[in-house]
Image: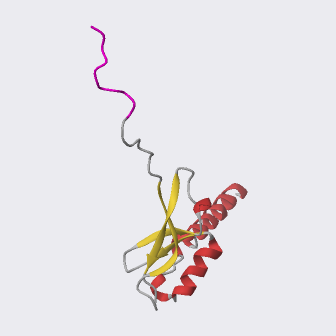
Amino acid sequence: MKNRFTTASFAAAMIALVATGAAAQPRPSTLAMSCGQARALVASRGAIVLGTGPHTYDRYVAHTGFCPHDQTTEPAFEPTRDNPQCYIGNRCIARRSEQPTGDSGGGGGGGGMN
């Protein structure tokens, strides 16, 4: 009997954990904050996902240290309660690969010997 009680208790605990998990937490929205509040939230958390409209959201970071090593940042301007284009922090983007410009050094001219 003890095993059945322990199994039932474990199952009930797991259901309770799932029911109160991250899925139940609402995402903060920039539309409900002032520009300063949104900027301060990104700065204090370092990285955070914020809603920016009824069906839109993105991840914002304080600096490149919160991005994967192969990414960099670009400034992020989003609507807030008091500013339609508020700088709230940065967003991680892929680094641009360095493309050589001009002559690749392969040569293409004459110079052959006859």
Relative height, residue 61 to residue 95 (above, below): below
Residue positioned 48% across, 70% down in the render: 75
Can you name the residue that lies furthest to the bottom here?
82
Report the magenta stretch's main SS: loop
Residue at (66, 64) in percent of width and height: 9
The color scheme shown is secondary structure
Quadrant of residue 12 within the rendered picture: bottom right
Query: Which residue occupies the foreground of this view, 76 or 37?
Result: 76
Confirm whether the magenta stretch covers residue 110. yes
At x 40% / y 86%, what residue is drawn? 84
- The residue lying at 57 percent from left, 86 percent from top is 37
Please give left or right for residue 61 compared with residue 94 in the image: right
Find residue 42 and report its horizontal and vertical position in percent: 58, 75
Residue farthest to the right? 2
Closer to the camera in the image, 17 or 103? 103
User: How far from the left and from the top, in percent, is residue 31?
Assistant: 45, 86
**x%, y% of residue 15?**
57, 67
Q: Position of residue 20 (x, y in %)?
A: 58, 73
Q: What is the quadrant of residue 13 in the picture?
A: bottom right
Total number of numbered labels?
0
Answer above or below: position of 102 versus 107: below
Residue nearest the viewer, comparing 73 with 44: 73
Q: Which residues are magenta?
A: 104-114
Quadrant, the C terminus: top left
Q: Is residue 58 above or below residue 101?
A: below
Per the image, is 101 magenta?
Answer: no
* Quadrant including the N terminus: bottom right
Toward the top, the furthest residue is 114
